Amino acid sequence: MIEVENLHKHFGAKVAVDGVSFTVKKGEVLGFLGPNGAGKSTTMRMVTGFLPATEGRISIGGADIEENEIAAKAKIGYLPEAAPLYSDMTVEDFLKFSAELRGVPAAELDAAVDKAIKTTFLEPVRHQSVDTLSKGYRHRTCFAQSIIHDPEVLILDEPTDGLDPNQKHEVRQLIKRMGETKAIIFSTHILEEVEASCTRAIIIDRGRVIADGTPDELKAKSRNAGSTILTVSGLAGSGIQAELEKLSEASSVEVLESGDDNLKARILPAKGKAGELSSAIYRLCKEKDLNVSELRIDEGRLDELFREITKTDSEA
Amino acid sequence: MLDALKTLILEFAIPTLVVSAIFIAILVFLLPREVRTIFKRELKSYFTSPIAYVLFVVFLGISNTLSFFFTGILEGGEADLFLPYFQYLPWYLVLIAPAVGMRLWSEEQRLGTMELLLTMPIAPWHAILGKYLAAAVVLFAMLVLSFPIVWTINYLGDPDNGVIMAGFVATFFVALCFLAVTSVVSALTRSQLVALLVSVTICMVLWLGGLPNISELLMNMKGGWLIFWPVVKLINVVGLMPHFSELAKGVLGFRDIVFFLTFIVFCLFATSVAIRLRRA
């Protein structure tokens, strides 16, 4: 549905996007992650045809965004980052205006507006002027505008920004549901959102794609993925830490908390021994007759991966 | 007096209303759907905010008061509306037309709605034309509202209403040119104030530049022709006043109308270039 090939964007001497390529198929929800200024919004603005690309090719459902601009744009629903709105219109008028411009036939206009209002919970403010709306309602009004023509492609720049936790949850569910029949790209700073609604995620840093995979694949790439967390008590001078370090399945032991009689530690597996590590630890604790209150395998975390691979940026 | 009123209705009011009706009918029915949608939204927004009303009051206040008190329309004893009234209208329009048009594109940029508008499945010229026409209708309404002065003149004397019509058409063309200039300028800035000031300056130059006294003054300055020669030449080409004067005399010159239309189309094209530049 969305094909992006070797996309570049230069603003004068500044390189904002530096060779980004990806594809999103129908039924996929692609999460865009990256630090501020990484080039996420710029990429989305090029995909929607707002900014011309310096180099590269973008195709939406087979239509090139530059050569076949109107056909390509007709397939897209777009929620810009700041959720801009005409402040002198009512919610309903604004949605009608957007539907008309997006080519919804006159006979279906009212039904389309009703549906979008219902989907984004705008009923209470339907006849209210946009400039009197709270931030959450403003955001949802702009979101409603992007889905009003039931597009095949949805591009959402931080769709949950400014929403309260309940609304965030609703929007994530909505994205997940719509993702079954559409191709969706959305950007976010909130990593749990990626796990909640994406089928795939890419991390962008300084204009380049530095990681691409399903949320599980990405998590598995983080340093602590596959490590075992152990909390034990009743140590009484058992020298458990030294014993753990001696295990052939373990490569290193990192103490997270330690008291007179208890210990919480992260044990990293030796190469190729990740599968056997936790059972070896369990056997050891049983031998020593310790009270194990926690023993679990860490799947890795997206925020860890995110920090690891984008770290140099903040340190620079 | 009854005769004057009859003439007024037959020769001025009815043609004006018919022309307005045709004008608006063309806009509503013949334009592409995209242009119509943008036109309707833009026009509505002029009248849901106080801008249009304030400008109406200011324009009618200035034009009527100044015309009466400074142009000697009453002392002249001659009820020939063209000279005192229409000759001065473009001077006020130098200020009023940019005030009507300053929000066209700068407001879109300030609100960020430009990003929405330009990612809709429409061509940029749809948006440029739709917005321009909405502002043009506001200016048109403003000129139509100056109708009472025509009534007054008809009451006082027996003017040639044909010449009044010509003055009206010429004035409207000049207003459309000023508006087109404002459209370009507002596409280049997100500040309405900057758009207003720059547009007023350019409109002033375009209007005054046509005055023979000004070009002579510039050319006769010591060494002035070195600096001003190219400027004066350019302004003589694009200066609006000669075309206005011809048209307002009641000579519906084909050449002058073509000049005005070319000027407007060129400015609207320049607006699309300006929008493209702002995005790159």
Image: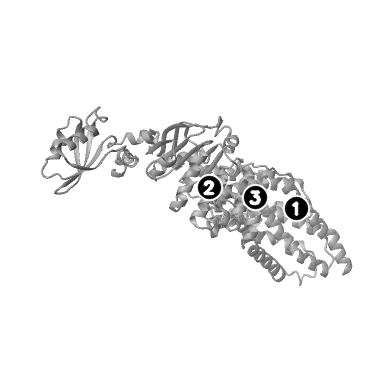
Q: For label 3, count other residues whose C-alpha is less than 10 Å away and answer few (under 14), some (14-19) or many (20+).
A: many
Q: For label 2, count other residues whose C-alpha is less than 10 Å away and answer few (under 14), some (14-19) or many (20+).
A: many
- Residue B267 can be seen, yes or no: no
Tell me where residue A201 appears, x and y as whole percent.
41, 36
Q: How is the image coloured?
A: one colour
The quadrant of the rendering that contains the N terminus of chain B is bottom right
> Which residue in the protein does label 3 denote?
B132
Q: Amino acid at mark 2?
A: Phe
Q: Amino acid at mark 3?
A: Tyr
Rounded to the nearest whole Å, what is the CA distance between mark 1 and mark 3? Answer: 23 Å
> Which residue in the protein does label 2 denote?
A143
Tell which of B41 and B204 is nearer to you. B41
Sequence-wise, the earlier of marks 1 and 3 is 3
Q: Amino acid at mark 1?
A: Leu
Tell me where residue A60 appears, x and y as whole percent.
54, 33
Query: How many labels sit on residues?
Result: 3
Label drawn at residue B247:
1
